[in-house]
Amino acid sequence: MIAILRKSASDDAVNHLVSWIEKKGLQTNVSYGENEIVIGLVGDTTKIDPFLLESMDIVERVQRVSEPFKKANRKFHPADTVVDCGHGVKIGGGNFQVIAGPCSVEGKNLLTIARRVKKAGATMLRGGAFKPRTSPYAYQGMGAEGLDLLIEAAGELDMPIVTEVMDPRDVQLFVDRGIDVMQIGARNAQNFSLLKEVGKTTTPVLLKRGMSGTIDELLMAAEYIMSEGNENVILCERGIRTFETRTRNTFDLNAVPVLHYLSHLPVVADPSHATGYTRYVEPMALAACAAGADGLEIEVHDCPEKAWSDGSQALTPDQFDRTMDRIRAIRAVISTGDDQS
């Protein structure tokens, strides 16, 4: 349930209403828009008489929310959420960012890659220190040592780090090390214990869609995080598993505008994991920009044929330079179109 208040409602009146609702045992989410104030009611809303609520002087109207996701719902929060990722980098609400780097941290070559992607225009550094792999015998990542290398690179280049956390027991390690953005990978998209644990922090979370997950399941995963108090969530479309075998996954670009319609959270697209092949990464990155993504996550490696994981989908630094030039061109067209509308 949401209560849309009159624009003239005073802060004291809003606070009084919020207090009254919370005394009924519900949680509230207050969003101040340009033309209205919205109070979202989360919990057993049968405790509130909607007709009594609507009769209050400051209440314009009351509306039921049928979707099971509440805090992630745009009806609760009409304005786009802007997530502060640290180092002066924000995403959402018109702030577009490119997250780039190797699939996995392998050693000192991380610095070489990081310097190149920043020079090309990337604003955030990605790299896996802990790697979920289908085979238990495949490379599993450098662990805490990999986090140290990421921190070293981020310190030199003043870039936020995006890296995957796999285990609820490691969340505090990531917080203690000052990791800027914790990534929840596709395989953990419904690891509810992990979602709750990152939700207890204030660290931004890049939440990837499960490989067979629906859009609603992605939003419900975000709801798990937000229900614990962490509202710094970034959604990521990274392709889903379908019957098609010519690419690693099927890049569901429908999800970008659909998520923007349903939710206020920023939406990032990952064309690397979606396609699985270097040759398709650039065109799908451009398509994601045109679809309105708030950011891109792209894998870059200085020598993809020697990469310890996912080399087949990594761009070389030279290829990334060209891709960034084209991303800027697409972004310029989109911005011009917005100005004219």
Image: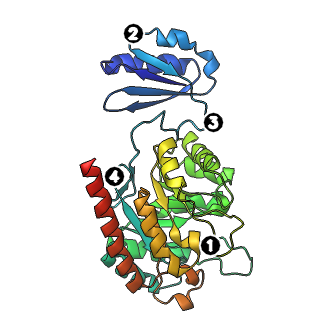
User: Residue 57's mark?
Assistant: 2
> In this figure, which residue is indicated by the disc labeled 3?
68
Q: Is residue 33 above or below residue 14?
A: below
Q: Is residue 144 above or below residue 48?
A: below
Place of residue 20 in the rendered image (x, y in percent of width and height, measured from the top left): 49, 16
How far apart are the alpha carbons under marks 3 and 1? 32 Å
The secondary structure type at the circle numbered 2 is loop
Q: Is residue 255 above or below residue 309?
A: above
User: In this rendering, does residue 143 appear at all?
Assistant: no
Sooner in the amino-acid sequence: mark 1 or mark 4: 4
Sooner in the amino-acid sequence: mark 2 or mark 3: 2
How far apart are the alpha carbons under marks 2 and 4? 35 Å
User: Residue 131's mark?
Assistant: 1
The secondary structure type at the circle numbered 1 is loop
Q: Which is more foreground, mark 1 or mark 4?
A: 4
Labelled pair 1, 4 in contact (Cβ < 8 Å): no
Place of residue 86 in the rendered image (x, y in percent of width and height, measured from the top left): 37, 58
Place of residue 275 in the rendered image (x, y in percent of width and height, measured from the top left): 57, 72
> In this figure, which residue is indicated by the disc labeled 4?
94
Place of residue 311 in the rendered image (x, y in percent of width and height, measured from the top left): 56, 84
Q: Is residue 77 left or right of residue 51?
A: left
Q: Which is more foreground, mark 3 or mark 1?
A: 3
Residue displayed at 69% across by 64% down: 242
Indicate the amino acid at tag 3. Answer: Pro
